[in-house]
Image (cartoon, helix red, strand yellow):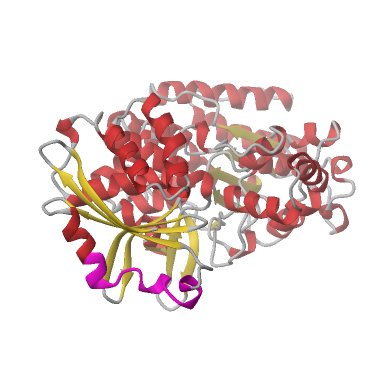
Amino acid sequence: MQDFVNIREDGFLYVDKTALIYDLISGSGKTFFLSRPRRFGKSLLCSTLGAIFEGRRELFEGLAIDSLGWEWKKHPVIRIDLNPGDYGEGPETLALVLHNILANAAAKAGLSLRGELAPDQFGNLIQDMSRSSGERAAVIIDEYDKPLLTTIDNPEQHKRSRNALKAFYGVLKSSDEYLKCVFLTGVTKFAQVSVFSDLNNLKDLSLDPRYNDLCGITQEELERDFAEEIQQIVRDKNTEKKIYLDELKRYYNGYRFSKNPLTVYNPFGLLNHFDQSGAFESYWYATGTPSFLIKLIEDQKIDILNLESESVTMADFRRFDAQNMEALPVLYQSGYLTIVDYDNELNEYYLDYPNEEVRTSFSQSLLEHYIHAPETDLRALVKTLPRALIQGDVDGALNGIKAFLAYVPYDIQIAEERYYQTVFHLIFRMLGLSCRSEVRLAAGRIDSLVETKNQVYCFEFKLNGTAGEALAQIDHKDYLLPWQGPALQAGGGKKLFKVGVAFDWEKRNIGEWKTVGG
């Protein structure tokens, strides 16, 4: 549920973020922007702010802000939610959506909407609401960038929508004396929209450590507010609480939005998990992956094998426009990557997948883009490959991959060893297996390293070579040395497998393989 009033009036659970909201709106700032991925609670945050500025204190009984000294004045509030609209036709649709929103806000305040164009109507409404009430207005704009994201694949419509929004948001600067607070949310921070170029006093909260968990659910909030749900699922699954919580964290936690190492859960995935009696599914990811993200990765030749070791600077986060998009910051802002570390000296943020839900699902999307395999064969691979590796059956695993690759159209394959290495990597990741590629050791780089509970598989690939040569390289470079030791020799560690794989370019598939170990 995204409406604060409904949640409170109907007695549903609300994870209390009002202490953070109070700190934000009781300070000297007036105009704020927050970037968070889709389905992350931005709309609920906007709804909560609206209720606060409307002075509806009765809804906040028992919440933090009610005891922090907030002055419960009733301010006029203009809520603009751009998420529901379909803006594919450009500014004409946008103009109609804005007109309807403003007309409804005016009618609710008992006012008439003045002006012909949306910017004029917006400016007049802010002034009229402030003057008629005797209080400055709060403007809350949710998903300000939806019209821009919708048209990003159509440069002409995108440009026209951008210019329309530039004029509309520019009204906020000229209306400053009538405004108590301006709060905007979105997924991205477009550089060429006036809200970021004209509003000199805008505070961008997106990477502010103080508001890292303004959206999302922390581990502490999870265990405090969802204790009943957790206990019920632990009983139903007949498992230990710690084991279940560790799996929950691995699958849905991991989002980090600042230098502060605090991570949060995606609310949409977590709440659907509880609603579905503890089923671990890709709820957030299933709501859709923008196709332009996959295209960005392809066009900019992003190294998928090392995606999780990339770094960006603060300046990279601030550069975003349709003509000059960098894939990594966009993947971060969209929720497919997150911050995992920060280097204070270099002022660099290191990125990785936030959790298992995104890691496996995004790998599947990339794999489907790379190889176009039939869904039936994909399901068969999902069923057989992990079981084979867990059982130490290398032949069974590679035969499964070989059958899968046979469906790949010959004209999309690339005569490069790295192409096949990437396909293997994505297959392993899609299946939720622990796979690392290009693993750096003192003696060289392991092509792919796959670990299960009881096995370690070291894969070396050759396109213009033999499986024997691949095995010889593993031995010569002593790739498995870090996994060898007294515990392993005594039978107390994992079984080690060396796997040399040679590709046959004429057959566009695996040619031969050799395995040592087990």
Q: Which residues are magenta?
A: 473-489
Expressed as whole percent of the image width and height from the top left, the position of residue 312 reads: 38, 62
The N terminus - image quarter: top right
- Confirm whether residue 17 shows in the render: no
- Confirm whether residue 157 shows in the render: yes
Q: Residue furthest front?
A: 490
- Residue 507 vertical position relative to residue 429 in the rendered view, above or below: above
Task: Name the quadrant containing residue 48.
Answer: top right
Q: Nearer the viewer, residue 229 or 382?
A: 382
Q: Write the residue at 47% across / 49% down.
A: 390
Q: Write the residue at 47% across / 76% down.
A: 344
The C terminus - image quarter: bottom left
Q: Write the residue at 60% across / 48% down.
A: 252
- Residue 413 vertical position relative to residue 311 in the rendered view, above or below: above
- Residue 400 vertical position relative to residue 68 in the rendered view, above or below: above
Expressed as whole percent of the image width and height from the top left, the position of residue 59 reads: 85, 40
Q: Nearer the viewer, residue 422 or 396?
A: 396
Question: Could you tell me what secondary structure mostly forms the magenta stretch?
Answer: helix
Q: Nearer the viewer, residue 238 or 279?
A: 238
Q: Is residue 443 left or right of residue 126?
A: left
Q: Write the residue at 16% across / 32% down.
A: 410
Q: Is residue 512 left or right of residue 120?
A: left
- Residue 151 vertical position relative to residue 213 in the rendered view, above or below: above
The verdict on residue 4 being magenta is no
Q: Is residue 199 left or right of residue 153?
A: right
Expressed as whole percent of the image width and height from the top left, the position of residue 155 reads: 28, 33
Q: Nearer the viewer, residue 256 or 353?
A: 353
The verdict on residue 480 being magenta is yes
Expressed as whole percent of the image width and height from the top left, the position of residue 22 reads: 75, 56
Task: Name the quadrant containing residue 372.
Answer: top left
